């Protein structure tokens, strides 16, 4: 009997854990939860002025996200030197000026460098620009043969011809569809991109990448409240911005942080931590990006920490299957970008990223833009597919899958023309 009970107990526990880790794609299964108020401090004080927001609420939210979600950066590390590896004022059939710049960093007898690929529209003086990471190397975003191929570790990808974790000519131009370079240049914007693996390889290994430059003696991995990979990639975006401040060809006051998916989580965190970014775009950023965690729809904190244990700080694991314990939610990450322009975009077939959770997040963040008399998302009703809402906080859900398309870029450009340029 005893044996029978313990056996059925084990089966029960097993089935519970299977139930718990099942992915929710059904709106009726979204739990009831209280959305934390962006304008109420942790001590329950109402925030009703820009001054109080900036002095009290914004810092406490930022502090919480640093310590519990993305991880804080242990020390400051500035560019040691930079080298213009290559430049051509007649690139892309005479339409663009191209530059490739390596930024180098040194600390603890270690060094790291990453390369910015920069295209600028030829006709413009000091144009604004979009800055975003790519997943497989700068040479994948264009067929331009002059773009240098990274020597950093890369995830293998058969359809891109990437073998042995290293890049070569086979992958050139494989991701052109995600980067509407011609449209961007024609609209008078520059485009800058960096291969994210040069800043920190996307593996659960903290011996490589930028982290190791900032370790204390005998430290081999970040402390529980120290930076994971997303914070490391965001750090790299800020260092690129440091470089732009020195480059007279670009307008460093008009740099828009862009990112897709994990790199959209990254652009949001970059915009939150570095107020020099003039605007932020989150393309299908999902869990740990724009989407509300407490909805537990699609990807959850438990799932993301399980698949990608290195993306967030270790403290974030406290919230695996324990979203109730989070005193914030991702709309408060978005609110840290106020009053600057923010664009959150979803895709209809990207249910894993919870489009509704991304939309609601922009909606619940909007009272902070209201404080500054800027227009956020005013209605709780999600817009129809392919009917964008353009205001200082913008949102669209387009048809199709998890990706970056020309449709997305056309909308980002329109929004940037009105709210950033
Ligand atoms: C998925 C991950 C998402 C998203 C995506 C991506 O596997 O679960 O959170 O970041 O990868 O970056 O493409």
Image (cartoon, rainbow, N blue to C red):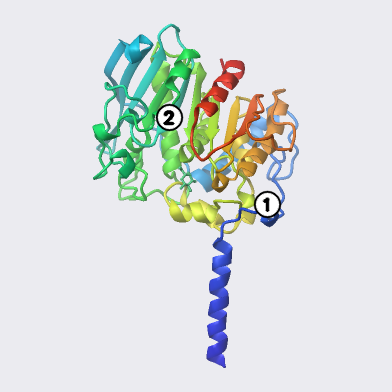
Q: Is residue 157 visible?
A: no
Residue 420 in picture, x, y percent from top left: 57, 18
Q: Is residue 319 visible?
A: yes
Q: Quadrant of the N terminus?
A: bottom right
In the displayed structure, 159 sits above or below 96; it is below
Please name the residue shown 69% across and 32% down the image: 366
Residue 411 in picture, x, y percent from top left: 57, 24
In the displayed structure, 304 sits above or below 210; it is below
**Dot 1 lies on which element?**
helix
Q: Residues within 10 Å of mark 1 (few under 14, many from 20)?
A: few
**Dot 2 lies on which element?**
helix
Residue 43 in picture, x, y percent from top left: 70, 45
Which residue occupies the foreground of this view, 118 or 184? 184
Q: Quadrant of the C terminus?
A: top right
Contact? badges 2 and 1 (CB < 8 Å): no
Please name the residue shown 60% across and 55% down the image: 24
User: What is the number of the mark on residue 377?
Assistant: none
Looking at marks 2 and 1 on the same chain, the residue that comes earlier in the sequence is marked by 1
In the displayed structure, 11 sits above or below 63; it is below
Residue on which the image places disc 1 = 27
Which residue occupies the foreground of this view, 396 or 107? 396
Which residue occupies the foreground of this view, 345 or 150? 345
In the displayed structure, 71 sits above or below 378; it is below
3D distance between C-alphas at marks 2 and 1: 32 Å
């Amino acid at each position: 009997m005893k044996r029978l009970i313990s056996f059925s107990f084990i089966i029960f526990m097993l089935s519970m854990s299977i139930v718990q880790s099942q992915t929710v794609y059904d709106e009726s299964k979204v739990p009831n939860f209280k959305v934390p108020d962006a304008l109420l401090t942790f001590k329950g004080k109402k925030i009703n002025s820009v001054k109080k927001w900036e002095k009290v609420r914004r810092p406490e939210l930022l502090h919480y996200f640093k310590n519990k979600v993305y991880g804080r950066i242990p020390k400051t590390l500035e560019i040691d030197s930079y080298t213009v590896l290559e430049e051509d004022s007649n690139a892309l059939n005479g339409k663009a000026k191209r530059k490739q710049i390596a930024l180098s960093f040194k600390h603890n007898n270690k060094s790291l460098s990453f390369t910015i690929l920069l295209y600028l529209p030829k006709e413009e003086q000091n144009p604004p620009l979009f800055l975003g990471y790519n997943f497989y190397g700068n040479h994948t975003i264009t067929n331009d043969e002059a773009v240098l191929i990274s020597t950093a570790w890369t995830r293998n990808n058969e359809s891109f011809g990437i073998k042995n974790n290293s890049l070569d000519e086979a992958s050139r131009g494989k991701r052109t569809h995600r980067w509407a370079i011609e449209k961007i240049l024609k609209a008078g914007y520059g485009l800058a991109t960096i291969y994210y693996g040069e800043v920190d390889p996307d593996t659960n290994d903290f011996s490589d990448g930028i982290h190791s430059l900032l370790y204390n003696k005998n430290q081999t991995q970040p402390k529980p409240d120290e930076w994971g990979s997303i914070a490391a990639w965001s750090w790299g975006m800020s260092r690129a911005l440091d470089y732009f401040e020195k480059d007279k060809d670009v307008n460093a006051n008009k740099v828009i942080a862009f990112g897709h998916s994990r790199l959209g989580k990254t652009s949001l965190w970059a915009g939150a931590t570095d107020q020099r970014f003039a605007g932020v775009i989150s393309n299908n950023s999902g869990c740990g990006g724009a989407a509300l965690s407490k909805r537990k729809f699609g990807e959850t904190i438990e799932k993301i920490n399980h698949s990608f244990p290195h993306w967030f700080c270790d403290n974030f694991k406290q919230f695996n299957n324990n979203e109730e314990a989070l005193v914030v939610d991702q709309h408060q990450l978005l609110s840290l970008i106020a009053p600057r322009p923010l664009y959150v975009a979803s895709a209809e077939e990207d249910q894993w990223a919870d489009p509704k959770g991304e939309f609601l997040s922009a909606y619940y963040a909007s009272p902070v833009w209201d404080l500054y008399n800027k227009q956020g998302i005013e209605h709780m009703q999600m817009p129809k597919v392919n009917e964008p809402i353009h205001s200082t906080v913008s949102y669209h859900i387009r048809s199709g899958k998890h990706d970056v398309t020309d449709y997305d870029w056309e909308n980002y450009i329109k929004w940037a023309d009105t709210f950033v340029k």
